[in-house]
Image (spheres, rainbow, N blue to C red):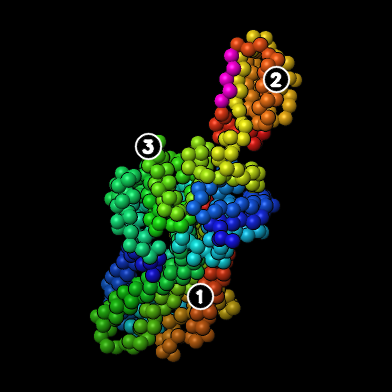
Amino acid sequence: MSVKAIEVQELAKYYGKQCGIENVSFTVEKGEIYGFIGPNGAGKTTTIRTLLALIHPTSGSASIFGKDCIREAETIAADVGYLPTEINYYENMSALELLQYTAALYKINAVNRISELAGKFNLDLKRKISSLSYGNKKKVGIIASLLHQPKLLILDEPTSGLDPLVQQTFIDILKEENKKGMTVLFSSHVLSDVQKVCNRVAILKEGHVIDVQNISELREKGFKKVELNLIESAPAELFEFAGMADFKQSNNQVSFIFHGDLNLIVEKIALLKLNDIFIEEPTLEEIFFHYYQ
Amino acid sequence: MTIFKYEMKQLKSTVLIWSFSLFLVILSILPVYIGMMSSADTMVLEGFGDNPLLEAMGVTLDVIATPLGTYAFLTFYVFLACAINGMNMGLKMITKEYMQKTADFIFTKPHSRGKVFFSKALAILVSALIIGLAYSLGSWIGMVIGAGSDYNFLVMTQIAFSIVFIQLIFAALGLFAGIIFPHIRAPLLVATAVAFVSYVIGSFSNKMGYTALTYLSPYHYFTSAEIIKTGSYELRFLVLSALLVFVLLGISYYIFRKKDIVIDA
């Protein structure tokens, strides 16, 4: 059996009596781009911080490339790049000094890599960290996380603060590095970002992994967003069946998200007199929202 | 070594300012005081006798009239400053990573928490040594100008180097406090308060004769009167100092290894 990039088993973290995460289990295969989605407070960051040994789990286990995240944190760190949500660096350093310090901490010579990545992000390396905008600090963070060509890149809300062009550059780099073999754990609540890059996604809710799905499956599983413009209003009971979510009715307008056998919904719609009908794929945000009903 | 070098770079200006300041202060004041004390009449000396610091130091008037006694008297003031500096260095070493929110950066690199902790501790040790050397050099030149060869070099060096031990004890205390309370926003204020409280405890215990309380005040581990009298540090206090530093470092390291890194939003 091949070693997994990440293997988390029944991981739990309590802050006193407060539950951070509980029974979190998932595996990330080598070379995969794995999404981690959930609203604020779902436990994404807690899980990530446990993987990075920044916090210690109350119970359960987590390993990266077969090594225990807590006991072998130092060894693991050499193969892992991390981009936190909040970017905070030593303010008195220039971007270049920070990146050189990062390279020194990884014991690598990264002169070429720094200029290559800084060029792609159009980053002025001479500027002090304190004078950089949040977006530019994020660019420094991205470069610092990729500097040592990690085998695993852990990203916590990586696109916040980046303009769309830089986001695209970043996603292109991710895909490029992924082709070379880098595994990515991509945590975000911006689901369109996850949709763009991830193969699979774990959905977190209130500290628990509630589902793990392939992105394509998630979209192809029959989730439909239906909007009906009716000639005559329909009784709401007509739509009371399994698989319905986000049902809204206002005068002759009806909208809902449906998940299940499409024939069932077609039969129901056939009973109605319609002005217009829209059936489209819901966005991941909407599918995601459906999970939280 | 990378973290150690970085920390040294961070401490560079502090070390330079402290080294130059102490060097210049002792160099300029010592000859003046030695001249004043050696030529002072009984009334002036009795005036000094009212100084509560002498009692706190355990120094008598006949000792303070000597060049080494004068030097010891002045160094006791330096102790307080060095205690503040040591405690501040120790506290800041830890709290800055939390206050600047850089803890995530440093603790996700391939260096164990032990390496990070001891690199920081080593940077403090080297800084304290540099400050101690600068003070010793200033003291030596000041002593030569003020007293010529009429003093014991070894005793002077030991008194001078007491400031290194004082810094280290308070730095270890600072590291410990920093690990327990990593979100302290004003480390200098805390360092000053702790140094003063410890100083007051020491002075009070000496004046009241509560010798047990003396152990709470590291200033009194290096009483100049004893060094001048015996020509060396008091062994029990030297051992106690080392023990204190090692125990504080050991406990701090133990807690630090297991502590969750929680950055305030």
Separation of marks 1 and 2 at Cα, in angstroms: 79 Å
> Of callouts 2 and 3, which one flags the residue occurring earlier in the amino acid sequence?
3
Query: Dot 1: within a 10 Å radius of its alpha carbon, few (fewer than 14), some, or many (20 or more) residues?
Result: some
Frontmost of labels 2 and 3 is 2
Q: Give the prevailing secondary structure in the magenta stretch.
A: strand
The stretch in magenta equals A276-280
Q: Is residue A77 rendered to the left or right of residue A208?
A: left
Frontmost of labels 3 and 1 is 3
**Disc 2 residue type?**
Lys
Quarter occupied by the N terminus of chain B = bottom left
Q: Which of B65 and A145 is in front in this view?
A: A145
Badge 2 and badge 3 both on one subunit: yes
Q: Mark 1 points at which residue?
A: B245
Query: Dot 3: within a 10 Å radius of its alpha carbon, few (fewer than 14), some, or many (20 or more) residues?
Result: few
**Disc 3 residue type?**
Leu
Q: Is residue A24 rendered to the left or right of residue A170?
A: right
Q: What element carries label 2?
A: helix
Task: Give the letter of the chain under mark 3.
Answer: A
Residue at x 62%, y 21% (from the top left corner): A255
Q: In this view, does A83 lie above or below A164?
A: below
Q: Where is residue A155 in the image (x, y as percent from the top left)?
A: 48, 49
Q: Which of A249 and B116 is in front in this view?
A: A249
Q: Where is residue B54 in the image (x, y as percent from the top left)?
A: 44, 77
**Disc 1 residue type?**
Val
Q: Is residue A25 rendered to the left or right of residue B202?
A: right
Q: Mark 2 points at which residue?
A: A268
Frontmost of labels 1 and 2 is 2
Q: Position of residue B205 (x, y in %)?
A: 55, 75
Q: Mark 3 points at which residue?
A: A165
Residue at x 36%, y 63% (from the top left corner): A108
